[in-house]
Amino acid sequence: MSEERLGEGEAMQILIVEDDFTSRSLLQRLLSPYGECHIAVNGEEAVEAALAALAQGSPYDLICLDIMMPKMDGQVALKKIRAAEEAKGILLGQGTKIVMTTALRDSANVIQAFREMCDGYLTKPIEKEKLLALMRKLGLFINEDA
């Protein structure tokens, strides 16, 4: 989807889902040169934002999703977002690129996230080089000069 919607140099639509202010600010600072960043502070807000973007026909290109959050954790939010894409007829691998950005390094959480179809998994502290390398790997166009 991202490659179909984005041309070289076009800004991405990015959703940062993070309840911790410092982590949220860091991700916003790292990602804002590459697109418009929206913020959600829990899984419920993330699902609402993703569904609204889908309904408007302009789904997010990238969602950075924390796992440990109040109201709804990132694993549940991931599952709900993927179910909404499927209901809209968006084929597996053609939807929003979702990267889990979390402090959880245990294999159970990593396996569960990939089982629910995340596209990548980065552990905190998030390093700019690793984030950008993953974005390139996922086919998201980024301006290397930013």
Image (cartoon, helix red, strand yellow):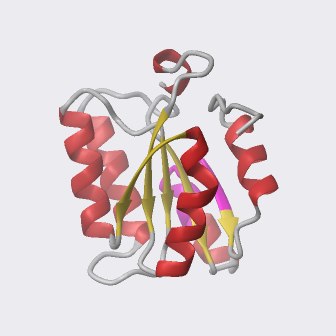
Res 36 → quadrant: top left
Magenta stretch contains residue 111: no
Tell me the quarter of the picture where residue 7 sits: top right
Most foreground residue, 52 or 106: 52
Whether residue 30 sits left or right of residue 71 in the image: it is: right
Q: How many dots with numbers?
A: 0
Residue at image position (56%, 75%) is 23
Residue 138 position by quadrant: top right
Q: Is 120 included in the stretch rendered in magenta?
A: yes
Answer above or below: position of 127 versus 59: below
Question: Foreground: 126 or 98?
Answer: 126
The C terminus sits in image quarter: top right
> Eyeballing the image, is 51 above or below 8?
below
Q: x and y percent of residue 115 in the render?
A: 54, 56
Residue depicted at 18% across the width and 34% down the height: 55
The location of residue 59, given as percent across then percent down, is: 34, 35
Towards the viewer: 135 or 30: 30
In the image, 68: left or right of 86? right
Q: Residue at x 70, y 68 (%)?
A: 126
Query: Image check: 58 left or right of 139?
Result: left
Residue 129 coordinates in the image, percent (x, y): 81, 54
Point 41% across, 78% down: residue:
19
Give the residues in magenta: 112-121
Q: Horizontal and vertical percent for residue 34?
A: 58, 39
